[in-house]
Amino acid sequence: MELSEVPHRLGRMLPGLMDAIMAMRFEHEWLSDEFVAESKRQAENETAKKHHYVPQMYLRRWAVNEMVQPVQVDTGDADPPQPPKEVAHEKNFYSLPATDNTMDTPLKWIEKHLSRIEDTCAHRLDSLEKWRAGVVSDDDLKKDLAVFLGLQITRTVSNRKRTLVLVNGPDAAKREFLKQSGLGPEAIEESMSKRQDDPKHEALDLMIKDVQNVTALGLHLREWAVYRTDAPLVTCDDPVILLAGPPNTRDRAGVAGNSAVALYPLNPNQVLVMLKPGLHHRGRYQLDQTETDSINTEVVAAATKTTFERPGDEIAIKIEVPPWPERQELDDETVARLSPQAALKELLTDAAPRTRWVDLHSAPPWPVPRWYGN
């Protein structure tokens, strides 16, 4: 289990620490106040309520006759093929209901903001596909896609759930975190008083801040390469796959900042592989059947619920993975029995990314061993 990025997220949630965190901000037009303002302007008359947490333009890369094949991982059921617009979405996922039960205008901009970025990144992904195979040397391309992929990490259902664990965590734990961060009593109380009233609103704020302050930079600094494969790849509802890598055991979840490998399937025959600084691509930029199979297993295991593939490929339905371990939020009764230090430890543990591979006896080895050498 990886805790290293959870304190950063808790710090972004508590305004008293934002000055230090802002020094790490990843500078990009799409994260600028001006770009956000334009998204808000364009969203004034927005009425769409079907919000996709995986872009349609991305899923179309697996479409055959405008259909993709969803597979429900935990049941092994293959749904009927569907258009990309009908999958990987939730109603009002990026919006809040106002008191009169209408969509809250200030938050409608997030869906518009994401769609504006997606429109440009569709062409960026096309550029990567034309790269065919090899190291990605275009830094402007990497910067754009670092933001896009960072948003893909933070916009998913699984990330929302982890964020809400932090947002809804006990105040005693949050005060202890601020205390350990060096804030005095007055600063702690000021920070605690500046939070959003609605937990979902706070989670949506964190979705953007995570990309600005940690995720995009962590992706951009990696060594990027496109690999090809003759055997088909699948993707899923959480398509940026983070692998902690050796010497970690398989029950260690990866995070954007320090996982050994970040994977992003580009289409059925190409995958973007981003290695952390210090690791290097070696060998051919072509995956053999065993390597492709191991990546597909990781994609299926990373899915919150659903994988997507070309109709007829029948890949995910043949891959069995363990269920997700249960995540339990701290309740008031439990918190009352804990010291502030223990409550903070429990909160950080509960909010950390997890992996399905908690049983080390059944877990596969880390995929593609040649990625982990120095």
Image (cartoon, rainbow, N blue to C red):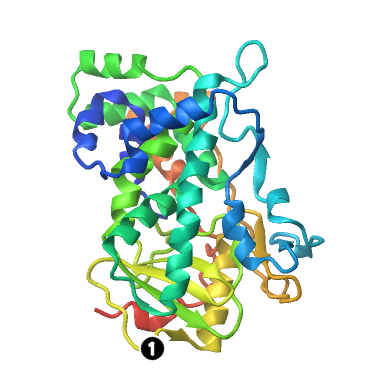
Q: Amino acid at mark 1?
A: Arg
The residue depicted at 19 percent of the width and 24 percent of the height is 183
The answer to whether residue 228 shows anywhere in this view is yes
The residue depicted at 43 percent of the width and 67 percent of the height is 127
Q: Where's the C terminus, which quadrant?
A: bottom left
| Secondary element at tag 1 | loop
Q: Position of residue 70 (x, y in %)?
A: 72, 61
The answer to whether residue 200 shows anywhere in this view is no
252 and 149: which one is in front? 149
53 and 199: which one is in front? 53
> Compared to 327, does 124 lie above or below?
below
Q: Residues within 10 Å of mark 1 (few under 14, many from 20)?
A: few
Q: Position of residue 99 (x, y in %)?
A: 62, 11
Q: Where's the N terminus, which quadrant?
A: bottom left
Q: Residue 327 sits in which quadrant?
A: top right
Q: Residue 245 sits in which quadrant?
A: bottom left
> Compared to 332, does 263 lie above or below?
below
Q: Residue 300 sits in which quadrant?
A: bottom right
Q: Position of residue 272 (x, y in %)?
A: 43, 69
- How many marks can you see? 1
The residue depicted at 78 percent of the width and 62 percent of the height is 81
The residue depicted at 57 percent of the width and 28 percent of the height is 95
> Compared to 130, does 15 lie above or below?
above
Q: Position of residue 221 (x, y in %)?
A: 26, 60
Residue highlighted by disc 1: 284
Residue 128 appears left or right of 67: left
> Compared to 3, does 113 lie above or below?
above
